[in-house]
Image (spheres, rainbow, N blue to C red):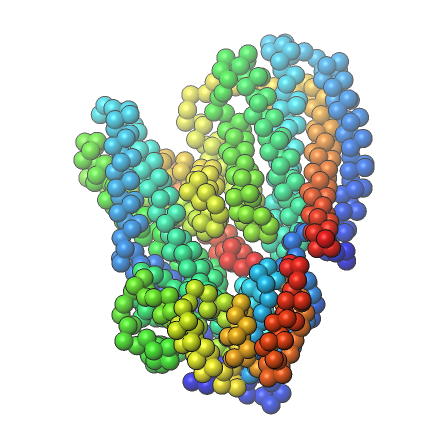
Amino acid sequence: MSGVAGRAARVSFGGAMLAVMRKDLALEWRTREIFSATVVFAALVLLTINFSFDPGQRAVEQMASGILWVAFVFAGMLGLGRSFVAERENACLDALALSPADPGAIFLGKAAANLIFLAVTEAIVLPLFAVLFNFPMGRAVPGLVLPLALGSVGFVGAGTLFAAISTQTRMREVMLPLLLLPVSVPVLIASVRLTGTALAGRALAESLPWIGLLVLCDALFLVAGTLLFGHLLED
Amino acid sequence: MSGAAADTPAEPAAVRARGLRKAFGAQVALDGIDLDLPAGTFLTLVGPNGAGKTTLLRMLAGLSRPSGGELRVLGVVPGPSAAALRARVGLVSHESQLYADLSADENLRFFASLYGVPDPEERIDAALAQVELRARRGDPVRVFSRGMTQRLSIARALLHEPSLLLFDEPTTGLDDRAVGIMVDLLAELHDGARTLILTTHRLDVGLRVADRVAVQARGRIVHEAEAGAIDPASFAGLYASLTEGRA
Amino acid sequence: MTETGSRVQDRMDAILRKVRNVTTPLAGFGLIAAAYFIVGYAPEEAQQGIVQKIFYGHVASAWASYLCFFITFVSSGLYLWKRDRAWDLLALSAAEVGVVFCTAVLLSGPFWGKPIWGTWWTWDARLTTTLILWLIYVGYLLLRPFAGEGERGARFAAVVGIIGFLDIPLIHLSVRWWRTLHPQPIVMNARGPQLPPEMLTTLLVTLVAFTLLAVSFIAIRAEIERLRDLAAVLRRRALREG
């Protein structure tokens, strides 16, 4: 209890990452802020698209992957924006930066939590879409796993980094989409393509280049985020 | 290994700064700070707003990079790669750095895991006892009073038993009773082994707890004295003249 | 080391001044030469007529904007590494000049496209990539004032400057593949290796002129920002000495 040195206090990269992720999940479990906001918002996007385009059966089949990703992206952006609100509120970002944990581990922990939130939203939006648009989803679901996973990782990777930036600015609600959307264009194009292929029941093997592109995007955003995140915490 | 430094006879100074600068273009936050602080000292840093006190503490804690000059904290140069140093420094600011929606217990548990504290349960218990919050450990921080929140913040900073503990305006927004508790706590933490630095607006608080007092103005340390040698009445006049034409 | 900056800043000041002194007059001559080549030397394209001459400025602007964004990328990295305002000045200046050239590409595209393709806008891969780049770097410029005065804006912008540039090949690839699945408008074939030698020469002259112009703009823009910093120092000193 004397004030002499922190004995062997040491934290591993993975340990810090897990701690941050678990903390974010616990916070979300307590408030359910992100979950309720994103799911309701995603439902509203689906509703708006339905009223705006009033698509017939043929059109729905052509547009399905696009509609889904519009809902994921806009709802996801709402969740990403929220993910740093609790960090900013009482200067918790400083507390994270003060700790011996690697900033990259903190980034990946936050990104992992955001990925889980987005995955839950997607899991709810998919059946909702199938019902609202009368779209036969059933058989296509297993094929959707890979496109949704690869696309979500890239989107959340870039999104977590830019959310960390935008929460520390004025007009943060505007700044996040402004920064995130243009940079995620390749992720969106590739995800919509792959998801479309999967929904049509075709083998993903024919879209190998798109898978490669998505993997590259995911790698870029995760690696860049891990390496650059420290600069967003420390001046 | 820097971790063994405390056991060696020639213990490095807690802080050694030479010509420390922080500037971005025309904005100068620190303009040549010289500071020597032997381990175990309690230093109070007073000065007007904009004097760069917060910047200096953030720099000591490794949250801010110097743009010039030399700095050693506990014998180590702070920086992104000095994780071992960060594990030995604690910072309590006027912002709580706690998650309002988590309970006191959950907050401490999170930070204990982030610091890799070896025996978290024991440490959390001890820290909560020290700030007298054991009975409220299950309550969310949101319902805590400002004074309680601030004490929990101190418990958080004590979890990893830092050798250097920094307090940035911890009394802001506290009523007199809470300030009294805080002063007692600070005196208790001043055990001769731990080094403490406190920045405050309140000269009375600063003089009561510290061994040394330094006045910072316009990004420089403009005066330093032993706390015992200071006469509060005349010091107020000196302070006013030193900080005139604020930064 | 001066009161207002670092040794790096002093050296960069000197280099930028030299660069400005050399490139500004050269850019002037280059532009006159390019104008001569475009108007007087390059033949009129048989099918497209006079509008095809927009092509030279269009392509040269695109090249100049990529060059600028590359400079922003490198200086952003150096800024994060060294945290010296000098690198931030360079990154910011290059990004602003890059956006100007990028805007020129986007504006000249339709003027050229309308008579040729019959539409103001086409989702051509190169044009679309340019639009996305424009959006990224406008975001970069907007981020600075929103992040607040000073080093925070510089740090955040540097992160965007790095990711934005690394993203360019991915954007280009994705947009190109995406385009091949859409009906193509009558894409003109003037670009590419089958360009007649007179046109190629004219293009090269314009490219050199625009490169000089971009570099001179960046140097001048960085100097203006630098003078602002100095003015702020003088203002502070005047206030302090009352």
**Between C181 and B138, the one nearer to me in the picture:** B138
Residue C136 point in image, percent of width and height: 52, 38
* Residue in view at x 61 percent, y 62 percent: B51
Q: How many marks?
A: 0
Residue beneath the point at 68% across and 69% down: B222
| Residue C240 horizontal/vertical position (percent) | 70, 55
Q: Is residue B79 visible?
A: no
On the question of residue A179 being in view, the answer is: yes
Q: What is the x, y in percent for residue C204?
A: 71, 26
Q: Is residue C15 above or below residue A26?
A: above
Q: Position of residue B178 (x, y in %)?
A: 39, 72
Which quadrant does the N terminus of chain C fall into? bottom right
Q: In the rendered image of this protein, does residue A11 appear above or below residue C213?
A: below
Seen in the image, is B237 located left or right of residue A163? right
Quarter of the rendering containing residue B158: bottom left
Which is more toward the observer, B146 or A27? B146
Q: Is residue B178 left or right of residue B197?
A: left
- Front in this rendered view, residue A205 or B239: B239
Residue drawn where x is 34% and y is 58% of the image: A24
Residue B15: name its quadrant.
bottom right
> Horizontal placement of B137 versus A80: left or right?
left
In front here: A23 or C73? A23
Name the residue at 49% across, 83% down. B190
Q: Residue furthest bottom?
A: B9
Relative side of C197 to B29, left or right: right
